[in-house]
Amino acid sequence: MSNKLNFDQLKTTLHHLNTDDTISSAHGILCGFACVKPNLSLDDWLNEVLVSINLNNLNEKSAQ
């Protein structure tokens, strides 16, 4: 099964999540983290990519 990403939709989503990162930058952060932290959680990565969301606040996390 192949899951294709829509580049424009992903770019718009990153913009709506208030991040200055490009898609390639977000991917690079994910790859770098995966290399140094094998038990990487989604929250760890999102904390680096997203600048205005508090992932410890469940209301904000679910809204995002």
Image (cartoon, rainbow, N blue to C red):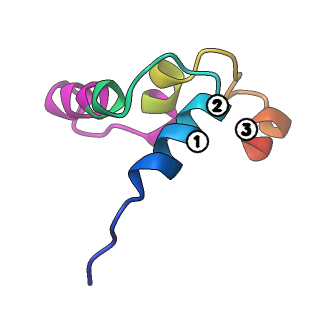
Who is closer to the viewer here, 22 or 27?
22
Q: Is residue 30 covered in magenta?
A: yes
* Rendered location of residue 9, percent (x, y): 52, 51
At label 1, the amino acid type is Thr
Residue named by callout 2 = 17
> Residue at 31% across / 24% down in the picture?
25
Query: Residue at label 3?
Result: 61
Mark-to-mark CA distance, 3 and 1: 15 Å
Residue lying farthest to the left in this orientation: 35
Q: Look at the image and tell me in which quarter the C terminus lies.
A: top right
Residue located at (79% from left, 38% from top)? 58
Q: Would residue 23 appear left or right of 20 to someone viewing this image?
A: left
Q: In screen coordinates, is 53 left or right of 32?
A: right
Q: Secondary structure at mark 1?
A: helix
Find residue 50 and report its horizontal and vertical position in percent: 56, 23
Instruction: Give the CA separation, mark 1 to mark 2.
Output: 6 Å
For disc 1, the neighbor class at 10 Å (few under 14, some 14 to 19, many from 20) is few
Instruction: Tell me the SS state at disc 2.
Output: loop
Amino acid type indicated by mark 3:
Lys
The label number, if any, that marks residue 13 in the structure image: 1
- In depth, the one of 12 and 44 nearer the eye is 12
Q: Quarter-wise, where is residue 44 in the image?
A: top left
User: As drawn, is 44 to the left or to the right of 58?
Assistant: left
